């Protein structure tokens, strides 16, 4: 299978929680967010990928898509909105809910990963915005198909996987992650039912636990520890 090299880059508390609302003052949360972006930039990648909730919360601004019924049915085939784009933001949006102001965020061209059940109205909306999209699965995201298409259709050699927990868990469960970059924060959260770095949904067939191999450890400012692990796949 042809695929990009996938690096899961995340920050979490010592107990694995990844939602920042209970981590202290906003100033401290902003400091941690700055760490995350700083060390993201140390990797040479052409794309980064998040789930719908993360994209809506942090990047799309909660915009509601304005939908109009198209004159003709739209085929379920990939659409390339910007053939000249060199960097990409990949949104896992199984049901077609995200709204966008334009076809890029932070200078990265947007690619939506959809299922075939998404409406023609939403596909027309994306086309009018010039946002690229691919289909991966009929009703649930097929991550192997998505990753393969991202490699085949776009100039993506290295992909940064950056949450949420269920997207990370699905990618882990399919053996699609090659490396883990984890910023371990000096925070003990303990929030009940708060998502962790890897969450495997109940409807998936859970694979055996994955063994990781330590590559590097660094102590950073503010008592943050940066861990790098390699995945070994058979």
Image (tube, rainbow, N blue to C red):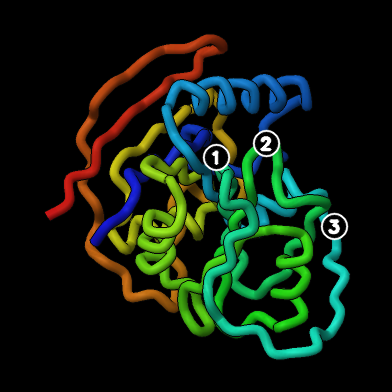
Relative to residue 63, is residue 113 drawn left or right? left
* Quadrant into which the C terminus falls: bottom left
Q: Residue furthest bottom?
A: 72
Where residue 75 sits: x, y (%)? 59, 84
168 lies above or below 86: below
Q: Which residue is painted at 53% across and 49% down in the image?
A: 49
In whole angstroms, how far apart are the C-alphas of marks 2 and 3? 18 Å
Q: Residues within 10 Å of mark 3 (few under 14, many from 20)?
A: few
Cβ atoms at labels 2 and 3 below 8 Å apart: no
Secondary structure category for the residue under label 3: loop
- Tell me if I can see residue 26 in this picture: yes
Comparing 198 with 102, the one in front is 102
The mark that comes first in sequence, 2 or 1, is 1
Q: Which residue is painted at 46% across and 78% down in the image?
A: 137
Q: Residues within 10 Å of mark 2 (few under 14, many from 20)?
A: few
Q: Which residue is painted at 70% across and 36% down in the image?
A: 106
Comparing 18 with 187, the one in front is 18
Secondary structure category for the residue under label 2: loop
Per the image, the residue denoted by label 1 is 87
Where residue 212 sits: x, y (%)? 23, 41
Cβ atoms at labels 2 and 1 below 8 Å apart: yes
User: In terms of image quadrants, where is residue 34?
Assistant: top right
* Quadrant into which the N terminus falls: bottom left
User: In terms of image quadrants, where is residue 120?
Assistant: bottom right
The mark that comes first in sequence, 2 or 3, is 3
Secondary structure category for the residue under label 1: loop
Comparing 63 with 87, the one in front is 87
In whole angstroms, how far apart are the C-alphas of marks 1 and 3? 23 Å
Per the image, the residue denoted by label 3 is 63
Per the image, the residue denoted by label 2 is 107
Q: Which residue is painted at 49% across and 18% down in the image?
A: 224
């Amino acid at each position: 299978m042809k695929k990009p090299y996938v690096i899961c880059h995340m920050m979490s508390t010592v107990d694995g929680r990844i939602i920042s609302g209970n981590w202290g003052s906003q100033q401290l949360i902003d400091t941690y967010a700055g760490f995350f972006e700083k060390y993201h930039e140390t990797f040479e990648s052409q794309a980064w990928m998040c789930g719908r909730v993360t994209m809506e919360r942090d990047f799309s601004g909660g915009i509601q898509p304005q939908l109009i019924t198209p004159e003709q049915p739209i085929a379920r085939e990939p659409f390339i909105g910007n053939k000249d784009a060199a960097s990409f933001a990949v949104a896992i949006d199984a049901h077609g809910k995200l709204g966008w102001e334009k076809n890029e965020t932070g200078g990265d061209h947007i690619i939506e990963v959809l299922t075939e059940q998404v409406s023609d109205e939403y596909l027309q909306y994306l086309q009018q915005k010039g946002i690229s999209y691919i289909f991966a699965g009929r009703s649930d995201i097929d991550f192997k198909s998505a990753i393969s298409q991202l490699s085949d259709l776009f100039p993506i050699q290295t992909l940064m996987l950056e949450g949420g927990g269920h997207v990370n868990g699905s990618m882990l469960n399919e053996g699609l992650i090659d490396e883990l970059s984890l910023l371990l924060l000096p925070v003990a959260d303990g929030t009940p039912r708060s998502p962790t770095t890897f969450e495997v949904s109940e409807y998936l067939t859970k694979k055996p636990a994955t063994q990781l191999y330590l590559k590097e450890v660094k102590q950073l400012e503010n008592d943050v520890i940066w861990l790098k692990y390699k995945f070994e796949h058979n």
